[in-house]
């Protein structure tokens, strides 16, 4: 897929699954960062796009909320634990595309 098509597919999937993502994360994300292209990982052997989810703290700063795996079939798996690298920096890492 071309980058724009991937962005659109991931964004639509996140919008369509926002209710279940919110239920899994315990809070509605205010921002999503698409941080990797289609890949497999130790935690998930199914090819997926990696998306970091953020909320806003009381000062309006981004607060890492969790991670979402987005699959080509329009499904998602949400993890209520942000990736360690995001927590360490408390910043988006290697943003491929920011989805707001």
Image (cartoon, helix red, strand yellow):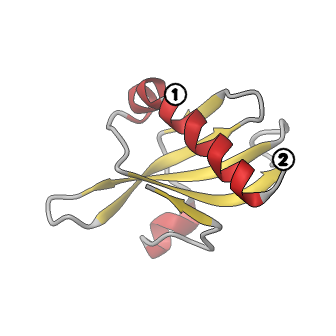
Quadrant of residue 35 in the image?
bottom right
| Residue appearing at x 52%, y 28% in the figure | 16
Ranked by sequence position, the earlier of labels 1 and 2 is: 1
| Residue appearing at x 55%, y 47% in the figure | 67
| Residue appearing at x 65%, y 52% in the figure | 7
Left or right: 59, with 100 as reference point? left
- Residue lying at the far left of the rendered structure: 58
Where does the image place residue 82, in percent across and percent down from the top left? 50, 53
| Residue appearing at x 83%, y 41% in the figure | 47
The residue indicated by pointer 1 is 17
Where does the image place residue 20, in percent across and percent down from the top left? 47, 24
Where does the image place residue 61, in percent across and percent down from the top left? 26, 67
Left or right: 43, with 34 as reference point? right
Residue neighbourhood size for the residue with mark 1, other residues' Cα within 10 Å, grouped as few (<14), some (14–19), many (≥20): some
Query: Is 38 drawn above or below residue 79 in the view shown?
Result: below
The residue indicated by pointer 2 is 40
Q: Are marks 1 and 2 in contact (CB under 8 Å)?
A: no
Query: Is 47 drawn above or below residue 84 in the view shown?
Result: above
Cα gap from disc 1 to disc 2, whole angstroms: 21 Å
Left or right: 77, with 41 as reference point? left
Quadrant of residue 69 in the image?
top right
């Amino acid at each position: 897929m071309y980058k724009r098509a991937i962005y659109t597919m991931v964004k639509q999937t996140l919008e369509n699954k926002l209710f279940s993502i919110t239920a899994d994360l315990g809070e509605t994300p205010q921002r999503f960062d698409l941080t990797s292209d289609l890949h497999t990982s130790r935690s998930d052997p199914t090819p997926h796009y990696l998306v970091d989810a953020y909320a806003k703290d009381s000062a309006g700063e981004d607060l890492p909320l969790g991670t979402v795996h987005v699959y080509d079939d329009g499904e998602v798996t949400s993890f209520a634990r942000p990736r360690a690298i995001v927590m360490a920096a408390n910043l988006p890492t290697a943003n491929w595309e920011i989805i707001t």
